[in-house]
Image (spheres, helix red, strand yellow):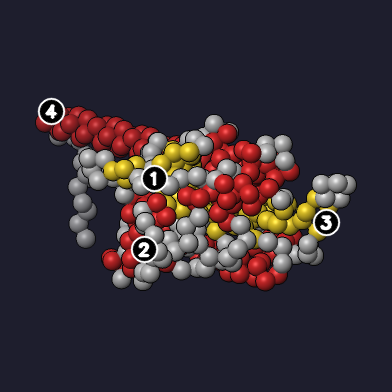
Amino acid sequence: MARSLPKRMPLPGVQHIVVVSSGKGGVGKTTTAVNLAVMLAKHGQDVGLLDGDIFGPSVPRMMNLAEVPLVDERNMMIPLMNYNVKCLSMGLLVESGPVVWRGPLVMSAIQRLLKGAVWGPLDVLIVDTPPGTGDVHLSLSQNVPIDGVVLVSSPQAAALDITKKGAEMYRALQVPIIGMVENMSHVICDKCDHRIEFADNLVEKYTQELGVDVLARVPIEKDVMQCSDRGTPVCLKYPNSQLAHSYDSLATKVLEFLANKTAKVYFFFFFSFFILIAALWKAFFFLISSASAYLRLLNFWNSASANSSSTSDCDFTFFTPRSL
C-alpha cells in the first residue's frame, strides 16, 4: 500500500502551504480562510486560495468568482484572480448539480487542483478544507508538505470536541498546528459597545490540552453574512471593524509562525553544513598526519637500508620478527 501512495512533493513556486481546518462543520472555516488570504495579500504576500471542499464549495461565491479557469499549453489550470488572491475551486469546474463521488475520485480531484494548476509564484497557499477527517485531509497531507494548520472552532463544547479530533489527526500525520481561531465567540453591541459572551470560556481549556495558542477571537458582526453572499470579504468592506482587526492579527501571527519555521530550517541547514565541514576538515588533517607519518617511516627505512649496505654493524632486529 505504501508504494501506491503519492509522493509528498512541494508545489513549484509555492513557499508555504497553510491549511484551515476543523472537524466540525458550520464553524466558519471558509470565512476564516477567505479573510486570512485577503489580509495576507494586504501584508504584501503573494497568496493563493484553494477550495478543498469538493462537495460544498463556497469560495467562488465569497470571492465573487464565476468563470471557468483556462488551461495553458501543458494542460495546467490557471487560477482566477480577485482581491490580489489566486483562487481555484471545484465550484468553478462543475457547472451545476451536486458532486456525487466516492473516495478515490475525491483524492484524484484534490491532486488535480494541487498539482494540475499553475500556482507559483506564491508566498503562501491557503487551503480551505471540508468538515471531518477523511479523504481530503489525507490526500493533502500525502501529496504536499503542509507548513501548518489553523484550527477554527466556535466556543461550545460540541464543536471543540470535534475540532480536537481534527487536531489529533494532523498530529498523527506529523503536521504542525499553528493555533486556534475562536470564531463567533462573542458579540459587541453597536449601541453601547457592551461585549456579550455566548458560552463559557471552554476554548482556553481545550487549547491547553492541545498545547496550542488562541490566534484570534473573532466576534459575530451583522455585516459578515451580507459581505460573504455578495462576494466582498468583510475585512475589505469594513477595514476598521473589530472583525477586520481580528483577521489582521491572525495574518500577522501566521506570518510570524512561517518566518520562525523558515529560520529553524536555515539554522538546521547551516548547522548540518558546519558539522559536515568540521568532519571533512578533521578527516583531512588525519589523512595529512597519516601520510606524514608514513613518509617519515619510509625515510627511516631507506636510511637504514643505505647504512646496512655500507656497514655490517647495523641491527635490524626492530624490523624483523623475532623467532618463537
Instruction: Give yes or no for contact between labels 2 and 4 (Cβ–Cβ under 8 Å).
Output: no
Q: Real-space Cα distance between discs 1 and 2?
A: 24 Å
Q: Real-space Cα distance between discs 4 and 3?
A: 109 Å
Of pointers 3 and 2, the one earlier in the residue sequence: 2
Of pointers 1 and 2, the one earlier in the residue sequence: 1
Q: Real-space Cα distance between discs 1 and 4?
A: 100 Å
For disc 4, the neighbor class at 10 Å (few under 14, some 14 to 19, many from 20) is: few
Label 3 or label 2, whichever lies nearer to me, is 3
The residue sitting at 20% across, 29% down in the picture is: 303
- List x then y, in percent, for residue 122: 44, 38
At mark 1, the secondary structure is loop
**Residue position marked by numbered label 3 in the rendering:** 196
**Residue position marked by numbered label 4 in the rendering:** 310
Image quadrant where one finds the C terminus: bottom left
**Residue position marked by numbered label 1 in the rendering:** 67
**Residue position marked by numbered label 2 in the rendering:** 107
- List x then y, in percent, for residue 227: 61, 46
Label 1 or label 3, whichever lies nearer to me, is 1
Q: Real-space Cα distance between discs 3 and 2?
A: 42 Å
